[in-house]
Image (tube, helix red, strand yellow):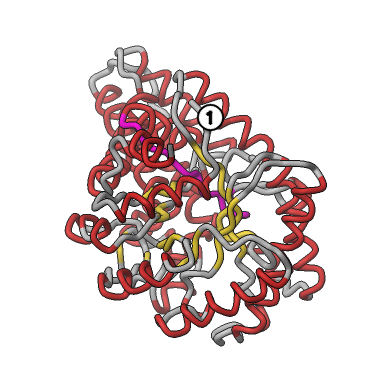
Amino acid sequence: MEKHSIKKVVEGLLNLQDTGDSATLLGIGPMSQNCVQAALELSNDDDYPVMFIASRNQVDKDEFGGGYVNGWDQFRFAKAVEEVAEKIGYDNQYYLCRDHGGPWQRDKERNDHIPEEEAMRIGKESYLADIEAGFDLLMIDPTKDPFEVGKVIPLEIVIKRTVELIEFCENVRKERNLPEIGYEVGTEETNGGLTSTETYETFINRLADELTSKDLPMPTFIVGQTGTLVRKTEQAGKFNFDNAYELAEMAKKYKVGLKEHNGDYLDDVSLLMHIPSQITATNVAPQYGTEETRAYLKLAEVEKDLESKSLIETASNTYDVLLEHAIKSERWRKWMVGDQVNLTVDEITNNKYLAVEILDIAGHYTFNDEEVKAEIKKLYENLAKHNIDAERFVIDHIKRPIRDYAEAYNLTGVTTRINNILK
């Protein structure tokens, strides 16, 4: 099947809207290889394109710390997705996407307060690896400024950095004679300044002027605030249809798609309202990591039952090891509410209710830890003795929320529908 550029796909979606048809693409955080397989299987079966949206913490160059997902850099990530696609006989369209690329986008870079010049240099080197590895879409997000914590970063600075980074990426892409790539700009964060429709339109207008003056392409997506917000393992925001609809209409004037972030854990009503709102794409990530963690814990429960019945000799220690590593990772802090952000590891370890909550939130950050991998391997082996395909259970468990979103977002058959309208 011929693969359209991501820009062409969005053009097709915007054209579909004009015919009374519509769909919202799903950007899936590649939380693990199991997650990648779950997404590709559904994309193949139900005929829709899928975007894998990797943050720099998840996938990055080894010299910047690599990624917590399988230790992937950009090339190993691309190869892993390709291998899964080959294994399952994939025949649709998937897109490798950089989520929140740019300066200070790794936790360590912000914590170390590296200066702007160094942060921009690192951001550009990371983008270069993305481009050389064949990424299809790059999010340009220069708004995570450690020197402006809690402040709205001036629009002039956001636009200046955005244009500089797009110009860099376009230059290196053309130098290497590589295919067209798409760009995503803006941010869902409140300190990005794009929280009102007025600011959003001002941003698009001024960005368009700057890009046109330098003969640079308009972005494929502009991120806008639709009211969504993820905290812990729930949707803490409230989907705002009116805001989404207005932003989508505004973006469409420039032949650009509205992208929503923080789309995890949305209820069915909110999901179904995405089609009339004409949002072109939604990002969902931590929810799939949590689903995988929950799958392991269910399998560990089955394993313990089998051990109690003397049907296996020794159960793995999956639960305890996942719990210990999740707490020690401290990556849960990003998702906590209020003063819980400052909880100590000891406070959590000594509170079984908090500990269980932290495991649900942060278990997926530990899947690549050697001790965790060893326990999961033992878990799989124990269950295989009783004809339980644990890996298949995990993949199918991750599929459940992806399927729910894909159905509500009218994605079934959308690859064919886009192909027909682009002919």
**Which residue shows up at 50% across the image and 60% down it?**
221
Q: Is residue 189 left or right of residue 78?
A: left
Q: Does any portion of residue 97 appear in the rendered image? A: yes
Whether 94 is drawn above or below 29: the answer is: above
Residue 370 versus residue 279: which sits nearer the camera?
Answer: 279
The image position of residue 93, as x and y in percent, is 47, 34
Q: Is residue 244 left or right of residue 129?
A: left
**Which residue shows up at 53% across the image and 74% down it?**
204
The image position of residue 165, as x and y in percent, is 71, 64
**Which residue shows up at 36% across the image and 62% down it?**
232
Where on the picture, by quarter, is residue 358?
Answer: bottom left
The magenta segment: 46-58
Whether 379 is drawn above or below 94: the answer is: above
Where on the picture, by quarter, is residue 70?
Answer: top right
Q: Residues within 10 Å of mark 1 (few under 14, many from 20)?
A: some
How many numbered discs sit on the rendered protein? 1
In this figure, which residue is indicated by the disc labeled 1?
Answer: 374
Q: Is residue 345 left or right of residue 397?
A: right
The amino acid marked with disc number 1 is Ala
Whether 81 is drawn above or below 402: the answer is: above
